[in-house]
């Protein structure tokens, strides 16, 4: 998929790498104005990578979410707020126990405006002293998005009782639901 692919007239695309896509997908799916969330890969050199290949760390790809949203309902700035809250942007090439470049924190922008908004969001977080360590989130242009295998889609909702979902995903979702209650479907 290319940066301009969209299924809905008037919709826009946001692409975020925030660690394991299973961990953050559900938090974005529950937001008003988000039409779809697709797990996948981008930022590397291997064409049409598989999950197994990406997990080796040799493809250069990050695990990402490709989000189609309606900006008249939810802004890109609000999606950035969720992005920065749902993961730790100070961890380089990891999120918790998930370690490797595929778990990096990265915003893949599709327009110059998205790049500017991401830069401003990072600057504001740093000036506010939200984190004790420097933010290491990268900001890069989206080139090609490769959809992940179908079994990654809607992972939390299909496997809510799995230990990983209970221990890692559910607390993130609860945090987002509380902080963004007015934006929940």
Image: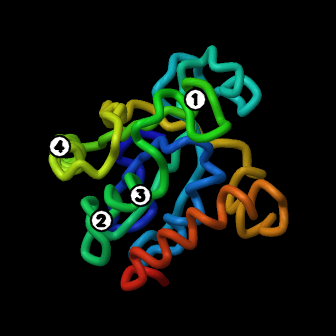
Q: Are marks 4 and 3 in contact (CB under 8 Å)?
A: no
Q: Earlier in the sequence, mark 2 or mark 4?
A: 2
Residue 170 sits in quarter? bottom right
Residue 109, horizontal then vertical, whole percent: 30, 41
Q: Earlier in the sequence, mark 2 or mark 3?
A: 2
Residue denoted by label 3: 85
Residue denoted by label 2: 78
Up-down relation of residue 169 to residue 87 (above or below): below
Q: Secondary structure at mark 4?
A: helix
Q: Does residue 168 appear left or right of residue 11 in this picture?
A: right
The structure residue drawn at horizontal position 48% and vertical position 57%, both measured from the top left corner, is 86
Residue denoted by label 1: 102
The structure residue drawn at horizontal position 46% and vertical position 81%, both measured from the top left corner, is 184
- Residue lying furthest front in this view? 132
Q: Secondary structure at mark 1?
A: helix
Residue denoted by label 4: 123
Q: Are marks 1 and 3 in contact (CB under 8 Å)?
A: no
The structure residue drawn at horizontal position 55% and vertical position 24%, both measured from the top left corner, is 101
Q: How far apart are labels 4 and 3 at the CA level?
A: 15 Å
Q: How far apart are labels 2 and 3 at the CA level?
A: 11 Å
- Residue lying furthest right in this view? 162
């Amino acid at each position: 998929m290319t940066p301009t692919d969209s299924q809905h007239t008037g919709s826009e695309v946001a692409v975020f790498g925030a660690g394991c896509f299973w961990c953050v997908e559900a938090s974005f799916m529950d937001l008003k104005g988000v039409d779809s969330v697709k797990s996948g890969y981008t930022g590397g050199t291997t064409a049409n990578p598989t999950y197994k290949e990406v997990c080796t760390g040799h493809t250069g790809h990050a695990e990402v979410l490709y989000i189609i949203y309606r900006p008249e309902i939810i802004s890109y700035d609000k999606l950035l707020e969720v992005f920065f809250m749902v993961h730790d942007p100070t961890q380089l090439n990891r999120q918790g126990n998930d370690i490797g470049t595929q778990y990096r924190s990265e915003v893949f922008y599709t327009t110059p405006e998205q790049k500017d908004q991401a830069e401003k969001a990072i600057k504001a977080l740093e000036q506010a002293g939200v984190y004790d360590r420097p933010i290491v989130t990268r900001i890069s242009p989206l080139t090609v998005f490769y959809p992940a295998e179908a079994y990654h889609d809607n992972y939390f909702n299909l496997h809510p009782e799995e230990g990983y979902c209970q221990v890692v995903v559910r607390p993130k979702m609860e945090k987002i639901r509380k902080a963004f209650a007015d934006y929940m479907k």
